[in-house]
Image (cartoon, rainbow, N blue to C red):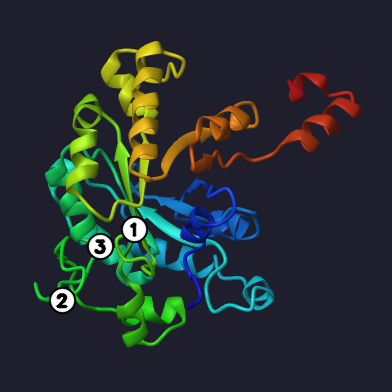
Amino acid sequence: MTERLNGVIRALQTGRRIAFTSFIQAEVESAVAFAQSSNDGVVFELEHTPWDIRSLRESMQFLLLRERIAKAQSIACQMTPLVRIPPSGSEMNQWFAKQALDLGAYGIAWPRISTPEEAYNAVAACRYPRLESAPLYELAGLRGDAPMPAARYWGVSQQEYYRKADVWPLAPDGEVLVVLMIEDTRAIENLEEIVRQVPGIGVLLIGEGDLTQELGCPRQYDNPELLRMMDHVLEVGKAYDIPVGHPHVTGQNVSRVIEQGYRFLMTYPKRDFSALDKGLQLAGRLAEAS
């Protein structure tokens, strides 16, 4: 069996089949910090921040820790980089995903995928074209050919990159993860059609924030209608064996989230000021610590 390079996919395939990730900024400081974490991967957040391809490329380089790679006896970055791109599904965009994949990203998170057509475009943009007579032709790929930087980042030859750079689980040995964000009521209504009609979906990631905006209860994550919709996504994901992601996993809810069956868990990248607060208290500066 060939080495699994994508650590998020590896986690989704082994043990309890649960992967841990976080949204982080495409900044060197964030990459350095998270390269040392126990996450399986990170998702560079470029939907709600400016699309800066140079910063993304530089940040991906700072995820590479030689010591961790050597200890793993691997060629792969041990903190798998995925990228959330700017366009919503309705824009039917492809070039943002192409640029991120060409740098060596191992997957794309697609915002606001609401229909089978949008889902098809998302998966197709992450696959290279092939003849109709070739194995796994459907879903037909649309990705353009420029693999050199990605092959170098993965540590493989160009020909080996071509063999590995397909979407999982459509291609069982594929190393590219397609994450579809379910963020509006239209997506909830169309979800079963999406997963039935579109092969190659790696993760269904619930977007609680956008859903609560549409429901008229912004960021009220205990809203009964929101919880009903989230349960529906979980049910569909389990029925079709597609991992479902939870974007707001905390120390308070992680046990419940795992028990419910979420498998793509996103913890919040929070800076820890507990030592500072304790120090201020010990120094008699209680007002500054409050």
The residue that appears at 49% across and 77% down in the rendered structure is: 1
Tag 2: amino acid: Ala
Q: Nearer the viewer, mark 1 or mark 2?
A: 2
Q: Which residue is mark 1?
A: 52
Q: Nearer the viewer, mark 1 or mark 3?
A: 3
Q: Are marks 1 and 2 in contact (CB under 8 Å)?
A: no
Dot 3: few (<14), some (14–19), or many (≥20) neighbours within 10 Å?
A: many
Residue 241 at least partly seen: yes
Under circle 1, the secondary element is loop
Question: Residue 162: x and y, percent?
Answer: 30, 79
Q: Which residue is mark 2?
A: 134
Under circle 3, the secondary element is loop
The residue that appears at 38% across and 26% down in the rendered structure is: 230
Question: Residue 61: x and y, percent?
Answer: 50, 70
Q: Which residue is mark 3?
A: 126
Tag 1: amino acid: Asp
Q: Quadrant of the C terminus?
A: top right
The residue that appears at 50% across and 35% down in the rendered structure is: 261
Tell me the distance, in whole angstroms, between the alpha carbons under discs 2 and 3: 17 Å
Mark 1 and mark 2 lie on one chain; the one further toward the N terminus is: 1
Which residue is at the far left? 132
